[in-house]
Image (spheres, rainbow, N blue to C red):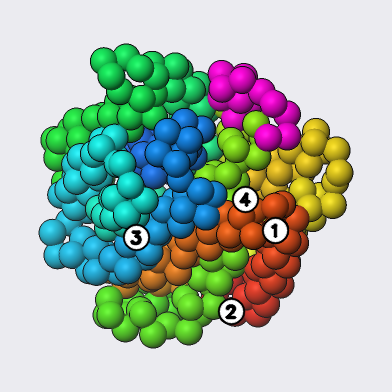
Amino acid sequence: MTATVPAASTGHDVLQRSDSVLQRDTMRRVSVRLMPFLFVLYIFNFLDRTNVGLAALQMNSDLGFSAAAFGLGAGVFFIGYSLFEVPSNLLLIRVGARRWIARIMISWGIIASAMMFVQTPMQFYILRFLLGVAEAGFFPAVLYYLSQWYPAAMRARSLAWFMIAIPLSGAVGGPLGTWLLDFDGTLGLGGWQWLFLIEGIPSVLLGVVVLYYLTERPEEARWLSDSQRSWLADQLRRDRERSPANHALPPLRALLHPLIWVAALPELLVTTAGYAYVFWGPTLIREALHLSNMAMGWLIAVVAVLSALALVLVGASSDRTGERVLHAAACATVVAAGCLGAALMAGPVAKIVSLIVMQIAVIAFLAPFWTIPTILLSGSSAAVGIALVNAIGNVGGFIGPSLIGFLKTSTGHDNGAFYTLAAMALVAAAICVALRRSPALRR
């Protein structure tokens, strides 16, 4: 009697442990191979689109740009980006993620360095627009690529580890950018020109490396063992089979999926606040605290590290509970509170602390939110759906800096902009809660 039941139980336990070890070893190898490299790519992607915020500390005065002109130029990037986001990902489906990511990086690196030649507002607008066109599709391409390597249950953590590059680009870009600004006058170039030149070159080089380093899909991964390839392919196949039939739409039909359009709205509303900080944060911090360029760079780096920590913690909590939309809603509510604080607080320190809280919550929002499109859609339709959500969301990159630039020029302060951003974040939280009614997103 004592010999039979334990024996069966032990055999089952051995199988479970064996599968658990295979899963752990496979996903560890996938993560070690892909995540550090993709992380570096996104560092330079985000750095090259946002370094104009630091460049403005010298460029605006050197070239005589008004706050409104700078805000428009910073934001027009996102018009080009959003217009070409979906076409870019339709091409991605045809040529493959590896080749398309390489093309994006090489072209954006060249244009990012060419920003050093700007002399007039119109040149600024044109190059920023072209930079947006060049970068269009990078983020959805990587999210689609990760969805081909990570089972659904592990996706929020994988996205968090990838998107941690967003805040950490600030940790790198803050000190690096302010150090490059100190090259002002070297070889007859302004510090802001050195910043654009030096920070664009690595993207070109990394784009070439992508072609030789990334593997298109698990079945082609020679760096996995046969058993690891089989296990991962089987897990991803099961995920696809568990998805409702209407998830596997033809790519263009994904553009008509109603929940994708609804899901894009929180991204738009929260991203608007995030980019308001990215492009105006250095200027607002200097005006409020009168810090030196280098001190401000290190403050931006500290904020970036705190944001990265929040992103990882929220992503882990979302995966542990299996709950996505309420995590995103909670983060959006904190964004609204930070915006209200930035508008209402009279003291400069309190205002900047509120601004920092807002930015940390914006970054934390990303991990649970970006699992939603990959739940609603799968396969090639997911690439197009992600692109649509990102295209709509990145319009916020035009609205945020343009709104602050316009109101600072017309009213002399930015309180009205932060009241507006707070209202937008609250609407985003409400939409996230409403999305929970969808059977696909209900835990």
**Which is in the foreground here, disc 4 or disc 2?**
4
User: Where does residue 33 sit, x and y in percent of width and height?
Assistant: 31, 32
Q: Is residue 302 above or below residue 155?
A: above
Tag 1: amino acid? Thr
Magenta span? 287-300
> Label 2 belongs to which residue?
439
Q: Residue at x 20, y 40 (%)?
A: 110
Q: Label 3, label 4: how many angstroms apart (C-alpha)?
A: 20 Å
> Label 1 belongs to which residue?
411
Q: Main SS type for the magenta part?
A: helix
**Which is in the foreground here, disc 3 or disc 4?**
3
Mark toward the start of the polypeptide (4 vs 1): 4
Q: Label 4, label 1: how many angstroms apart (C-alpha)?
A: 26 Å
> Label 4 belongs to which residue?
362
Mark toward the start of the polypeptide (2 vs 1): 1
> Label 3 belongs to which residue?
81
**Which is in the foreground here, disc 2 or disc 1?**
1
